[in-house]
Amino acid sequence: MELKQIVSLYEEIGAEFVSSATQIQHKFQKIKCLIFDWDGVFHGGEKYDNFKGSFSEPDSMGINLLRFSKYLLNRQMPKMAIITGLHNNTAKQFADRERFDFQYHNFKEKNGAFQHILKENELQADECAYFFDDLLDIRVAEQVGLRILISHNANPYFSNWCKAHNYADYVSAHSGGFLAIREACEMLMAIGGNIDKVFLARKNFDASYKNYLDQKRNSKLVLLEPVDIGLQEFL
């Protein structure tokens, strides 16, 4: 599918390409690390007892396929991280199940976690993509190479503010909790050019996907709080 057709496919459901598809394609080629906010991205932001949240399996599949896509394109596993403002047991369980590399929790100021990711993995800021939804994410969003803003119908001013200040490359049609992550992951794979290859490899469970799974299983989650990286002032 040509880029123009991909753009039309997503604009028809209400998504917005703040950067052009060509620009997003160029940015995506550089990405070596996928970073996710949690509240408002994986779910609508609701909190339950013990600060539990939720996630959806279609979003989980989207992340897995996007990770596989980058594995095929880069010939190596992308780094995976979640940054949360509070300790969240569900986020930890998800990150552990999906063999993420890092989960940063209790980070009221998320830039400290982002700088730690860059340092620990010898990454440049433009080699990271960030999936986010709110104001406390902006210090990270303004630095990374690729910014996916998860939309909420209730904050049109914030969305326009992000676009006006160049803090977003793509604004999702769907909200957190309504498969916005799946939408964005499929969009990136389509623009990246290997979505059909990814789908077929996963459908057939072929050798490339098995090799990817073997490497994924070797990833071990590291849990970090501000005090663990010398940022006690943010507790």
Image (cartoon, grey):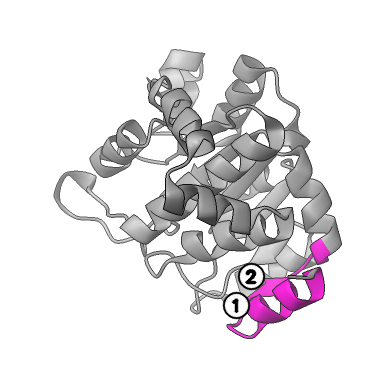
Q: In the image as oriented, which residue stretches furthest toward the left?
A: 49
Measured in 3D between alpha carbons, the distance from the residue under mark 2 to the one under mark 1, in whole angstroms, is: 5 Å
Please report the residue visible at 57 percent of the width from the left and 55 percent of the height from the top: 135
In this rendering, the answer to whether 54 lies above or below 114 is below
Residue stretch rendered in magenta on the structure = 3-21
Query: Which part of the image, by quadrant, shows the C terminus?
Result: top left
Which residue in the structure is indicated by mark 1?
156
User: Could you tell me residue 205's position as x and y percent?
Assistant: 42, 44
Query: Which part of the image, by quadrant, shows the N terminus?
Result: bottom right
Q: Is residue 186 left or right of residue 191?
A: left
In this rendering, the answer to whether 54 lies above or below 162 is above
Which residue in the structure is indicated by mark 2?
159
> Do labels 2 and 1 touch, CB within 8 Å?
yes
User: Could you tell me residue 40's position as x and y percent?
Assistant: 42, 59
Q: Secondary structure at mark 2?
A: helix
Please report the residue visible at 44 percent of the width from the left and 54 percent of the height from the top: 203
Residue 153 in sight from this viewpoint: yes
**For this rendering, which residue is in front, 47 or 2?**
2
Please report the residue visible at 46 percent of the width from the left and 45 percent of the height from the top: 64
Q: Amino acid at mark 1?
A: Pro
Q: Amino acid at mark 2?
A: Ser
Q: Is residue 53 left or right of residue 180?
A: left
Q: Is residue 198 left or right of residue 103?
A: right
User: Could you tell me residue 89's position as x and y percent?
Assistant: 24, 38
Q: Secondary structure at mark 1?
A: helix
The image quadrant that residue 148 belongs to is: bottom right
Please report the residue visible at 49 percent of the width from the left and 59 percent of the height from the top: 181
